[in-house]
Image (spheres, rainbow, N blue to C red):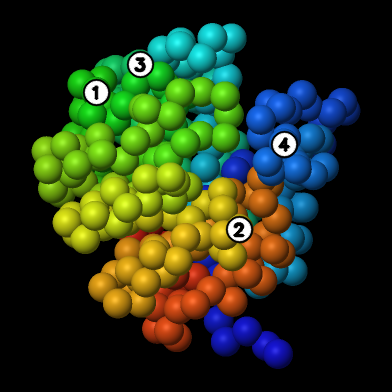
Amino acid sequence: MTAPYKLVDAFLQMPQLSRRAHEQKIDPNIAKWFKPGDAVKLGFTLEELVRDMDAAGVEKGVLTAAALRLAPSPYSVGQNISDETYEKLCTRVAEIRLQQPGRFHGCLGIDPTGMMRAVRWLERAVREFGFRSCWIMPSLVGLPPNHACYFPIYAKCVELDIPIKLNVGVPGPLRPAVPQHPGALDEVLLAFPELTVVGCHLGHPWQGEVIALLQKHRNFYLITSGWAPKHVPAELWQLANKRGPDRMMWASDHPLLSLERCAREGWEVPLADAAKRGYLRDNVLKVFRFD
């Protein structure tokens, strides 16, 4: 059966120029739960990503370029991303977008503890390299999203009129979960009503709080990245069917989950036709402005 429309992925990781010569050491906690394949262990190229997207019926994707890493201590704060690293990330995504016109939306991973340097890099990424959103993973930053160091980034996102993705819920890597409790976003959404905030990875096990935020704040959305669609809690589908057909977005977090599996299970989620199309395609196009 031919699919009635193509999918749009709200969270893709960035490909390498070539596969790694040696297998990457994987966080044992991630390896236990995600059972990473070769694309995680050895990396993947742009050609392989495009091939997998075509095979899964994925037309476009939000390409997330980040240098956030696991520090030796789970209590560390900040990533201290260098100017050289930001430059390489921005240049690489700009090259990919030129090679695949219209296929990818650039999303820059930011360390908010860089303060004004991070703000300037975000502005440069948007104005010079064509990025259209940014992303922060609070558990790797070591601070919750209502900490003062995030606020200059939020203000710049409002000024640039771009959305921000923020991870919510217990993280896969062995890092504290408290910085990603969704309750911290309530203050952010109240302080910045013009800011479009997109939660990533469901917010499990606090999906009740996530649902409350989706109902309370019109500028808050949710991506089901990092979760196979068949494992998404039923109450989130109930929200999408009844009150929030425009609030949830499909994503794979490729390569942690395969595009083929997430696409196959995405078509099977218990949503009405209009809500399903919004989830699999239209909501991503609208929120991330694939124009």
Q: Please determine whether, in this image, residue 195 is positioned above or below residue 101.
A: above
Q: Marks 3/1: CA distance?
A: 13 Å
Q: Which image quarter holds the C terminus? A: bottom left
Residue 226 percent location from the top left of the image:
56, 49
From the image, tell me which residue sits under label 1. Answer: 147
**Residue type at mark 4?**
Lys
**Residue type at mark 1?**
His
Where disc 4 sits, the SS reads: helix
Where disc 2 sits, the SS reads: loop
**Residue type at mark 2?**
Ala
Where disc 1 sits, the SS reads: loop
Q: Marks 2/1: CA distance?
A: 31 Å
Q: Marks 1/4: CA distance?
A: 32 Å
Q: Indicate which label's residue lies in the foreground, 3 or 4.
A: 4
Q: Marks 2/3: CA distance?
A: 33 Å
Label 2–label 1 contact, CB within 8 A = no
Q: Please determine whether, in this image, residue 210 is positioned above or below residue 151.
A: below
Q: Please determine whether, in this image, residue 275 is positioned above or below residue 26.
A: below
Residue 146 percent location from the top left of the image:
23, 29
Residue 214 percent location from the top left of the image:
26, 57
Q: Indicate which label's residue lies in the foreground, 4 or 2.
A: 4
- Mark sitting on residue 228: 2
Label 1–label 4 contact, CB within 8 A = no
**Residue type at mark 3?**
Gly
Q: Sequence order check: which comes first, mark 3 or mark 4?
A: 4
Q: Sequence order check: which comes first, mark 4 or mark 2?
A: 4
Q: Please determine whether, in this image, residue 245 is positioned above or below residue 60.
A: below
User: What residue is shown at x 17% (from left), y 56% (from top)?
Assistant: 216
- Is 75 left or right of 146, judged from the image as shown? right
- Is 277 left or right of 160, judged from the image as shown? right
From the image, tell me which residue sits under label 3. Answer: 114
From the image, tell me which residue sits under label 4. Answer: 32
